[in-house]
Image (tube, coloured by chain):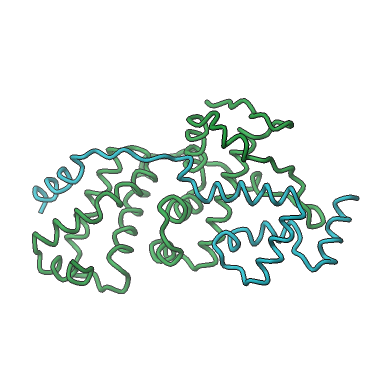
Chain colours: A cyan, B green
Amino acid sequence: MIRLLKCWMMKLMGLPSCDEIEQFAYAYLEEQLEPEQRKKFERHLRGCVNCNRFIRSYRQVAEPERFLGKTPLDPDFERRIADFLKDSL
Amino acid sequence: MTEKTLVEGLKQQSSQAFEELVATYARQLYLVSLRILRNPQDAEDAVQETFLQVFQSIQKFREESSLFTWLYRIVSNKALEKLRKQGQREVVSIEPYLPHFESGQLVDQMRDWRGQLNLGLHTKELARFFEKCIDELPEEYRIPYILKDVEKLSEDQVCDILRLSKPTMKNRVHRARLVIRKRVEDRFFSSTRGALAQPNLE
């Protein structure tokens, strides 16, 4: 019931619904929403804890460098590649 | 050396151009290859084969795409060929990890990741599980995600490399993010009072 009420309120205010937040999450993060759409998107986020958390965690996944760390590279790697090519060509 | 000069040099079989090509691109190609294959030796082999193919077929390179795109396309294909030859790898079905809605509202209760991430708890386990989530994505979602979000290539570059339309590429990256998000949340952030769920890593 509360869910339906919230949905109705969002619609009444001309704001996107939760499923539209999911649908446009990519465009929001990549800054591809029109300014007016973006404003409405962010108003929804301010009024909806669940979507707010969703977008925050979605952003973390879209910026995985925080989790993945740096890949160690062998300093001899390029020399090995160059040697291989000399031998092969 | 500009890309145009480099391509001209390669077409004239200039050794300086070959050296420049390796110096400029070997590491980037290795990183993407390693991300796909997860094995340093196989990744290095894929890079060697990529350069070999470039040198052998540079005369046919018509410069319709950039050299960068061409190299990435070759190395991705080489890495994927190797992966397929290695046989079945564990892949998850994406459907169970997509958000569920009822009357336009999210059914799933989202967790707040902030406090727990800031505490830096379980960092290594989280990193390992995150890698696992990427590895277990179906190939059509995994490769666009790696190129776009891990390697930070532009949308146009990813589309060119994978020969995908922009809406398809965006949709696949989006779905990959949804799956990883949900799996990480279920594993690490699913307790009810904000404390970290105990990771159960195999």
User: What percent of the width, then of the height, locates residue B81?
Assistant: 35, 49
Query: Looking at the image, which residue is at 19% across and 53% down?
Result: B23
User: What percent of the width, then of the height, locates residue B27?
Assistant: 27, 49
User: What percent of the width, then of the height, locates residue B22?
Assistant: 19, 54
Q: Is residue A36 left or right of residue B31?
A: right
Q: Residue A31 lies in what quarter of the image?
A: bottom right
| Residue sitting at the far right | A1
Label tally: 0
Query: Looking at the image, which residue is at 68% across and 72% down?
Result: A36
Query: Looking at the image, which residue is at 22% across and 49% down?
Result: B48
User: What percent of the width, then of the height, locates residue A7?
Assistant: 83, 58
Q: Residue B9 lies in what quarter of the image?
A: bottom left
- Of the 4 image quadrants, the one containing the N terminus of chain B is bottom left
Q: Nearer the viewer, residue A10 or B130?
A: A10
Q: Vertically, is B65 above or below B109?
A: below
Q: Vertically, is B197 above or below A54?
A: above
Q: Nearer the viewer, residue B61 or B145?
A: B145
Query: Looking at the image, which residue is at 11% across and 50% down?
Result: A88
Q: Residue B119 lies in what quarter of the image?
A: top right
